[in-house]
Amino acid sequence: MKSLREVIAEAEEQKVAVGHFNVSDSSQLWGIFRAAQKLDLPVVIGASEGERDFIGVRQLVALVTSIREEFDYPIYTNADHTYSLERVKEAIDAGFDAVIYDGNKVSHEENLEITKQCVEYARAQDRDVLVEAELGNIGMSSKLLDGIPEGAEITDEMMTLPEELAEFVAHTGVDLIAPAVGNLHGMMKHGNNPKLNIERITQLRAAGGVPMVLHGGSGISDEDFIAAIKAGIGMVHINTEIRKAYRDGIVDYLQANPDEVAPYRYAGAGRDALEAVVEARMRLFTQK
């Protein structure tokens, strides 16, 4: 089976993107896997620190690994948005295929040094572990938004600069980089999120020399997704959008069946709603 590194490289060559979807329970995992399997596409299962704490760090790896082995399927794990070296090490030790160190809470200098330490730890393993970093402020919460979060304004000055990204990659040795290009974590309650700067994506991919990841995919227009992938995005993160679908599926089911108490029935309705969104996104990300 191909490694995650190979899967992302192949997607870039084909001018498509790998879908990355977050989970915090097994029903969500099955919904994502069923969508990917239907389309015969590789998929990355992400889990933030909070999501990992809820489902279990090692338990999530075990669940995904069991699916990978039983179905001989290219499904991978990513420790999304990890805020300390200690928790990066925890995820790597648990068997995650990739990990993101998010240095938005520390200074630029600390971000550089801690990211470099994360890379060094990953390289010391006897398996290929990808390390990703985020460069630029795009907000920090996967939720429904009333407006643009403070500190994540969509202006040219707030977006990641090519020379800044090139220096960061060279100093740290990261395998993947997630820049600020007009994207936001979370999803606007009313209308689409702001438009992406496609020209900046092209410039950043050329400057950094490593695959780029688009965070905050929920709420971005289909046109911007397609243009961003053609410009150099190799993987796209979706979380808020599928959280909302999962919740709405459960709410609709319980409204129609107010006396239902079997979790597998109402969680199954959420899973099915989530699966439909994941399938639609994966079709879009691989549109040629």
Image (cartoon, rainbow, N blue to C red):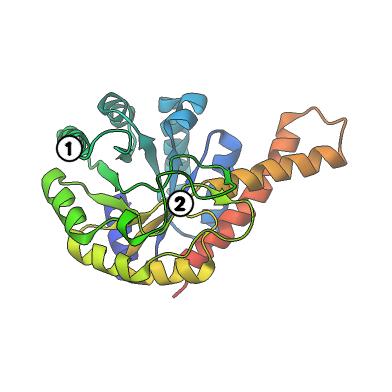
Task: Name the disc covering residue 45, or none.
Answer: none
Question: Relative to the observer, which residue lies in front, 88 or 182?
Answer: 182
Q: In the rendered image, is residue 286 in sight?
A: no
> Looking at the image, which residue is at 25% across and 67% down?
203
Q: Residue furthest bottom?
A: 288
Confirm or deny contact between disc 2 and disc 1 (CB under 8 A): no
Marks counted in the figure total 2
Kind of residue at disc 2: Leu
Image coordinates for residue 57, horizontal then vertical, percent: 42, 27
Left or right position of 92 against 150: left
On the rendered image, what quadrant is the C terminus found in? bottom left
**Separation of marks 2 and 1 at Cα, in angstroms:** 23 Å
Q: Position of residue 117 (x, y in %)?
A: 16, 33
Left or right: 95 as drawn, with respect to 36: left
Q: Measured from the top left, where is residue 79 in percent x and y? A: 37, 37
Find disc 2 in the rendering and name its residue: 184
Residue 204 drawn above or below residue 170: below
Label of residue 109 in the image: 1
Report whether residue 12 is seen: yes
Crowd around label 2: few <14 · some 14–19 · many ≥20 (10 Å): many
Residue found at x 12% / y 51%: 170
What is the secondary structure assignment of the residue under circle 2? loop
Mark 1 nearby-residue class (10 Å; few <14, some 14–19, many ≥20): few
56 or 152: which is nearer to us?
A: 152
Q: Amino acid at mark 1?
A: Glu
Tell which of 217 and 52 is nearer to you: 217
* Among numbered discs 2 and 1, the one appearing first in the sequence: 1
Dot 1 falls on a residue whose secondary structure is: helix
